[in-house]
Image: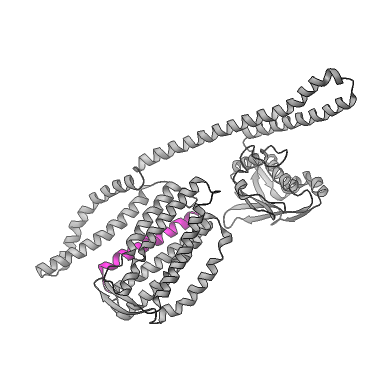
């Protein structure tokens, strides 16, 4: 059923590398939607290339036709899964309506693609092996493929032009656009179906895409996890590329020598393989140096030193920025507190006997001084955070005790409180005072955004079996937060609330991070906001 064909080796090895890369990304972060989407896209590429390689290996026309039909059909899932990947990457879940429709069309198309001669028939023998012949309906399949691909690229292009997106995100999108464009040049594999006697080299463009994606993962951290630059990544790409060239050279030279010498021998092929293999070692070292220089802009030690320097530089800039922000905000607040004192001193000689004036000044001055005192206390907490003193704490009891502190405000605002705790007696290693402060800041914000009533929902979820984390969700039905404001919420002194200092959530984020946790925010304007605190289960 199968026979050796050197033209089948490149797509076969490329399909295996694509599958490996998809599994590698997924295993790094199996719970992330982005990793799952990347794996699906890699699987669709693997299915297409692997089926084509089996077609080239086939010596039976009927088997070859089945594999070429299967590969062509699986290729329709490439743009669909790319759209899903782009959707997760640019975080536009509300534009996912295209996916169910396109999947339905692709599934309906399956039986016709696999069984009907109206799409593909033949196959026709070429110098590289059998290949299918396009039927009268195959042009509609190509049109559908292009429509799906256009939707995917359109989504990335609109995200690139979004003024609310930061520059680092735009750089990643540009790289993605370039890499996907190169990958889609693999569509040259459509041409032999219309009788053009050219080798379907779509695998070469996919291999180029793999190199670019590897660069993005290493330098741009494009899939939200940090990969340390190791030689193993480069070696795997090098050895695969060299293996493809190596196999093709051995087979071609063997055929040439057998033709001229009119002598066929296994020992001749083994001798050629051994001699060429000797050249692979220096070639591999040279290619590694060239690849590191061109693709990664430096060798591994140079990249490590550069990354370390950049990390220190970014950290120093953030520290100076934070100090400047704190200083300017503190000056502003102290000035607000001093202004009424200055006004009192100016009018005191004329109104020292006016009790109404004295009482009014007392109220204003007391309020401003208390505000300044609270700000100073928060500044100390933020600037000199104390290390948490961990002890085993019942998280549900801690949440219940914290709710008592805002109970009067909840009743006064007419807010409905809903609690949904996962179970009783969940013990976490926490500093109870610090975590109570963190939850109190979130709860106060939730209560303050619902002055005319609403619903405050507190929910806990034990995800120990999956991610070894415990999640506390605090959700309100307030006005919501604008998308451009969410990314600034944990910055010190960033507040759009009247009378707010902008330090509460910054302190909360700092406390949660010191406990090894993280905080996420989901919000929709007009519907409300949800804070999710994830704490580790030890």
Q: Where is residue 410 in the image (x, y as percent from the top left)?
A: 79, 48
Q: Quadrant of residue 241?
A: bottom left
User: Is residue 411 found left or right of 61 in the rendered image?
Assistant: right
- Whether residue 217 is visible: yes
Q: What stretch is highlighted in magenta?
A: 3-29
- Decide which of 519, 145 is in the foreground and name it: 145
Q: Where is residue 111 in the image (x, y as percent from the top left)?
A: 45, 79
* Quarter that holds the N terminus: bottom left
Q: Position of residue 491 (x, y in %)?
A: 61, 40
User: Looking at the picture, does residue 159 appear above or below residue 390?
Assistant: below
User: Looking at the picture, does residue 451 appear above or below residue 51?
Assistant: above
Q: Quadrant of residue 5?
A: bottom left
User: Residue 456 lies in magenta, yes or no?
Assistant: no
Residue positioned 39% across, 37% down in the render: 305
- Decide which of 292, 335 is in the foreground and name it: 335
Residue positioned 48% across, 52% down in the render: 223
Number of labels in the image equals: 0
- Whether residue 384 is visible: no
Q: Position of residue 178 (x, y in %)?
A: 40, 55
User: Is residue 21 found left or right of 242 in the rendered image?
Assistant: right
Colour treatment of the image: one colour
Q: In which quarter of the image is residue 369?
A: top right
- Decide which of 322, 32 is in the foreground and name it: 322
Magenta: main secondary structure:
helix
User: Residue 23 lies in magenta, yes or no?
Assistant: yes
Residue positioned 45% across, 56% down in the render: 25
User: Is residue 42 found left or right of 13 in the rendered image?
Assistant: right
User: Looking at the picture, does residue 200 appear above or below residue 333?
Assistant: below
Q: Which residue lies furthest to the left in this view?
A: 261
């Amino acid at each position: 059923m199968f026979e050796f064909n050197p033209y089948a080796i490149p797509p076969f090895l490329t399909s295996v590398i694509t599958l490996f890369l998809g599994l590698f990304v997924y295993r790094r972060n199996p719970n992330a939607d982005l990793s799952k989407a990347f794996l699906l896209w890699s699987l669709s590429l693997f299915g297409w290339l692997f089926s084509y390689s089996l077609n080239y290996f086939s010596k039976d026309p009927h088997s070859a036709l089945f594999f070429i039909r299967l590969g062509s059909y699986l290729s329709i899932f490439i743009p669909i899964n790319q759209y899903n990947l782009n959707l997760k990457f640019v975080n536009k879940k509300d534009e996912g309506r295209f996916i169910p429709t396109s999947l339905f069309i692709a599934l309906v198309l399956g039986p016709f693609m696999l069984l009907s001669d109206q799409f593909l028939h033949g196959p026709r023998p070429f110098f590289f092996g059998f290949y299918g012949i396009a039927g009268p309906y195959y042009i509609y399949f190509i049109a559908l493929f292009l429509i799906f691909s256009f939707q995917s690229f359109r989504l990335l292009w609109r995200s690139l032009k979004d003024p609310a997106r930061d520059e680092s995100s735009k750089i990643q999108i540009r790289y993605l656009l370039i890499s996907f464009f190169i990958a889609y040049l693999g569509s040259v594999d459509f041409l032999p179906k219309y009788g053009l006697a050219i080798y379907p080299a779509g695998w070469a463009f996919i291999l180029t895409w793999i190199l670019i994606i590897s660069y993005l993962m290493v330098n741009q951290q494009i899939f939200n996890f940090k990969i340390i630059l190791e030689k193993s990544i480069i070696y795997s790409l090098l050895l695969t590329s060299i293996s493809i060239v190596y196999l093709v050279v051995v087979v071609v030279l063997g055929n040439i020598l057998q033709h001229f010498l009119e002598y066929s021998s296994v020992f001749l092929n083994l001798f050629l393989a051994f001699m060429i293999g000797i050249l692979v070692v220096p070639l591999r070292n040279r290619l590694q140096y060239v690849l590191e220089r061109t693709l990664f802009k430096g060798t591994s030690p140079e990249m490590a030193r550069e990354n370390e320097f950049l990390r220190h530089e970014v950290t120093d800039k953030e520290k100076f920025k934070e100090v400047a922000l704190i200083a300017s905000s503190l000056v502003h607040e102290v000035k607000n507190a001093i202004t009424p004192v200055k006004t009192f001193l100016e009018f005191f000689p004329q109104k020292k006997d006016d009790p109404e004036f004295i009482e009014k000044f007392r109220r204003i001055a007391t309020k401003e001084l208390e505000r300044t005192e609270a700000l100073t206390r928060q500044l100390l907490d933020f600037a000199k955070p104390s290390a948490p003193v961990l002890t085993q704490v019942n998280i549900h009891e801690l949440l219940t005790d914290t709710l008592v502190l805002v109970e009067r405000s909840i009743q006064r605002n007419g807010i409905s409180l809903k609690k949904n705790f996962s179970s009783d007696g969940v013990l976490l290693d926490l500093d109870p005072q610090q975590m109570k402060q963190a939850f109190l800041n979130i709860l106060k914000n939730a209560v303050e955004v619902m002055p005319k009533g609403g619903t405050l929902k507190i929910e806990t979820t034990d995800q120990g079996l999956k991610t070894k984390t415990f999640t506390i969700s605090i959700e309100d039905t307030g006005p919501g937060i604008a998308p451009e404001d969410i990314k600034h919420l944990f910055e010190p002194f960033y507040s759009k609330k009247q009378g707010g200092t902008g330090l509460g959530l910054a302190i909360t984020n700092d406390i949660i991070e010191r406990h090894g946790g993280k905080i996420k925010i989901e919000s929709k304007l007009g519907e409300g906001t949800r804070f999710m605190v994830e704490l580790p289960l030890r």
